[in-house]
Image (cartoon, rainbow, N blue to C red):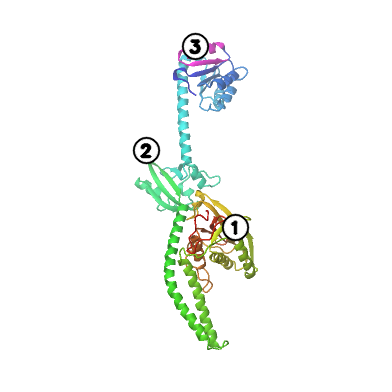
Amino acid sequence: MIHAAERALVVVADDDIIVRMLAEECLGELGFSVLVVGNGQEAVDACMERNPDLVVLDVMMPVMDGMDACREIRNMPGNEYLPILMMTALDDVAAIDSAFKAGASEYTMKPVNWHVEGHRLRNMISSAASRREVDLTRREWERTFDAVDDIVIILDLDLRVIQSNAAAKRAISIEGFSLAGHLCSEIHGCNAEKCGHCPLSKAIETGEHQQAKRFDGCRSGSYLVSAHPVRDESGALSRIVYMAKDITLQERLREEVLRSKKLSALGTLSGGLAHDFNNLLQVIIGNADIATLDLEPDSEPFDCITEIRGAAVRGREIIDQLMTIARGGEDGRRIVVSLNIMLTELFSMMKRTFPSSIKLEMETEPHLDLTLVNKVQFEQVIMNLAINARHAMPDGGLLKFTTKNITLDEFSCESFPGLEPGRYICLSVADTGCGMDENTREHMYEPFFTTKKTGEGSGLGLASAYGVVQRHGGSIVCESAPGKGTRFDIYLPACDVGATPAPPDGTINSESSSR
C-alpha cells in the first residue's frame, strides 16, 4: 500500500537512538511520515499494524535482529512488493548476500546520510509500486488468457512456444512435458520440422492471418485452427498467435444432418420403387400358388415352384422394410409401453433361439418411465440390433441389454441431434463382438450397406432401426471399435402415466406426453 505521495510511511528499526532521531528528523523534512522502533520485533509489529510503504532495518538489533525481521516481514501476506532496506556498519559480502536471501530489496552502509538516502527511498517506493502494477496487469492478462476455452499458443518465428493458455495445457496433457520452449512440431508429434499446409508457416510467409481445419495428432477430434501474425513497434513480424477451436461436436452434428438427408432421399427413392416391385412380386407369388395346385407335393416341379415362391416372399419382406424407411411419419398406432416389459418378452425368445455360446444379460431400471411407441416396429428395432450382435460374435460372447431413466439438459442435448431438454429412456444394446471401424460406422445406417456375406443380410436392419427411432422423436448413438465390441444407445422421450396413444397418422398429442 502506498500512502499519499508526499507522506509515504517509512518504518525505521535501529537500536541506536541517535540513528532513530536523525532518520525521523531528516526523512520528515523530505516529506515522509516516519515511525521509529528499537528492534526487529517492534518492526514486525509495526508492519502488521500500520502497513508501511517502506521498511529500514539495522542488521544487528536486540530481541530480533534485522535478518529475522526481514524474513518475517517479507512473508506477511501482501508484502511481496514492500521495499526493505537493510543497513549495517560492517562491510561484509557474506552479510550482504544473506540480507538479499532474507528478502531485502536494497543494502546500505552506515553512517547513513538520510537526506541523500531519502531520495533513494522515494525511488524504491516508486519502483515497488510500478513493479506491483506490472505484475497485477500481467496476472490479470494471464487469467484472461486462461479463461479462453479455445487453445491459444504464442510462438516465435522459429515456431517455438513462448507461452500457452490453460486450455492448451489441458488438451496437450503429456505428463512432465512443458510446452514452453518446445517446437510446434514436437507438441503435435509431427515428424517434419514444419507441417505441410500449416497455417503457422503460411502466416510467417505472407504476414497475414491464416485458417485451416485439421485433425491434431496428439488430440482426438477435429479443430478449426488459425494463425495470427503479431508485429512489433517497427512493423516487423515478431511472433505468431496460434488458436485452435474444438469443432468435433459441430462436425458430428453436421455429419448426422447429412446422414439424415441422405437417408431421406434414399427412402423416397426406395419407396417409389418398392410399390412397383411389390406388385411384380405379388404376381409371382399368385401364379406360383396357382401352379402348385395341379402338382404333386413331392414332385420336383412342386419343389422348384415352392422355392420360387419362397424367394418372392423374402423379396416382399425386404420391400416391407424399404417401405418402413420410406414412410416418413407414418408409424401406425403408437401405444404407451414399458421398455422393461417389452425387453423381457423379447429376452425370453432370444434365450431360446440364440446359441448357447452367447451369454445374454439384462439390467433394467426398476422404475423405468413409460414411452409412446409403435410396439411392432420397436420390437423389430431391438431384434435387428440383437441379430447384428449375434453375427458379430460367431465364437460366442456377451450380449447385454440395459435400460435407465435419464434427464438431458441443454448442454447434454448438443451431443444428440434432434433432441430437446427433458426426460428420456435410454436402452443400451452392447456386445463383445468384433466391433466396427470408422468407415463402417459412417455407412452403417445406409440402406443395403452390410458387412455380412451375400445372402446373410439385406443391409436394411440398421437403416430401418435408425428411421424408426428418428420418427419416434428419439436418437440412436453408436460406440464401436475393432476388437472392442459395439454398443448402441437408443434415447426415447419419456411420457406421463396418463398419456394416451397417438392417432393413426403417427402424430403425438402434446398434452398427453411430456418430454
Q: Residue at x 47, y 35 (%)?
A: 140
Where does residue 49 sit, x and y in percent of width and height?
56, 20
Label 1 sits on residue: 403
In the rendered view, does 14 fall on the left or right side of 326? right
Picture disc at residue 25 = 3
In the rendered view, does 129 fall on the left or right side of 345? left
Can the viewer see residue 339 in this picture?
A: yes
Q: Nearer the viewer, mark 3 or mark 1?
A: 1
Q: Amino acid at mark 1?
A: Thr
> Of callouts 2 and 3, which one flags the residue occurring earlier in the amino acid sequence?
3
In this picture, is 34 found above or below 383? above
Q: Main secondary structure of the magenta part?
A: helix
- Is 291 colored magenta in this rendering? no
Can the viewer see residue 448 in this picture?
A: no
Q: Nearer the viewer, residue 502 or 477?
A: 502
Q: Residue at x 48, y 13 (%)?
A: 28
Q: Amino acid at mark 2?
A: Asp
Where does residue 56 sit, x and y in percent of width and height?
53, 19
Picture disc at residue 451 = none
Structural crowding at the residue carrying mark 3, measured as other residues with C-alpha within 10 Å and reported as few (<14), some (14–19) or many (≥20): some
Where does residue 314 sit, x and y in percent of width and height?
51, 75
Q: Residue at x 47, y 25 (%)?
A: 128
Where does residue 260 sit, x and y in percent of width and height?
45, 61
- Is 26 colored magenta in this rendering? yes
Picture disc at residue 232 = 2
Q: Nearer the viewer, residue 371 or 467?
A: 371
Span colored in magenta: 17-37
In this picture, is 168 found above or below 111? below
